[in-house]
Image (spheres, grey):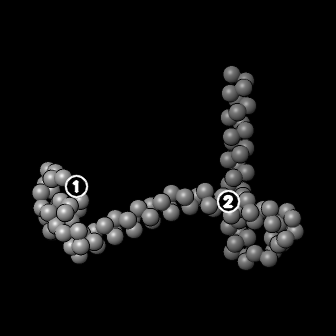
Amino acid sequence: MPYVNRNRDGKITGVFEQPAPNADERVADDNPELVEFLYQTQLSRNIQHLSATDSGMIRIIEDLVDVLIGKNVIMFTDLPEAAQQKFLARKSVRDKLNTLDNLMVDKKDIL
């Protein structure tokens, strides 16, 4: 049976295998509050993981669209207008960042 600590409202805020400061209450493994706390904790971790990988996935999708357009599998105009605008806006920002990156590399080479 795990040990839990609770906040002032009586809600579980942590789970431990051994007694810990402010965590000396034991609860059954199937305690509904414990099950809910563990579920919410795992859900939060999964959401954080998805959020952390979103930018990488966005870049993959942008590259995929570029490849499909380059191979004439789809035409840029096949995309909805809103998607075209977002795609072009992101491409513009990436181009500006690449230009700045190249300037920084050139400046380092000079110094």
Tell me the kind of residue under disc 1.
Answer: Glu
- SS state under label 1: loop
The residue closer to the viewer here, 52 or 85, is: 52
| Mark number, residue 57 | none
Quarter the N terminus occupies: bottom left
Between tags 2 and 1, which lies in front? Answer: 1
Q: Secondary structure at mark 2?
A: helix
| Residue 55 image point, x, y percent | 58, 58
Look at label 2 and name its amino acid.
Answer: Ile
Asked whether, in this view, residue 10 is left or right of residue 101, the answer is: left
Residue that badge 1 annotates:
17
Quarter of the rendering occupied by the C terminus: top right
Left/right placement of residue 45 relative to residue 100 reads: left
Label 2 Cα crowd, 10 Å radius (few <14 / some 14-19 / many 20+):
few
Q: Which mark is residue 60?
A: 2
Q: Residue at x 44, y 61 (%)?
A: 48
Q: Residue at the spot x=87%, y=65% of the render?
A: 71
Q: Nearer the viewer, residue 42 or 73?
A: 42
For this orientation, the residue located farthest to the top is 111
Tally of marks: 2
Q: Quadrant of residue 2?
A: bottom left
Q: CA distance from mark 2 to mark 1?
A: 41 Å
Quadrant position of residue 15: bottom left
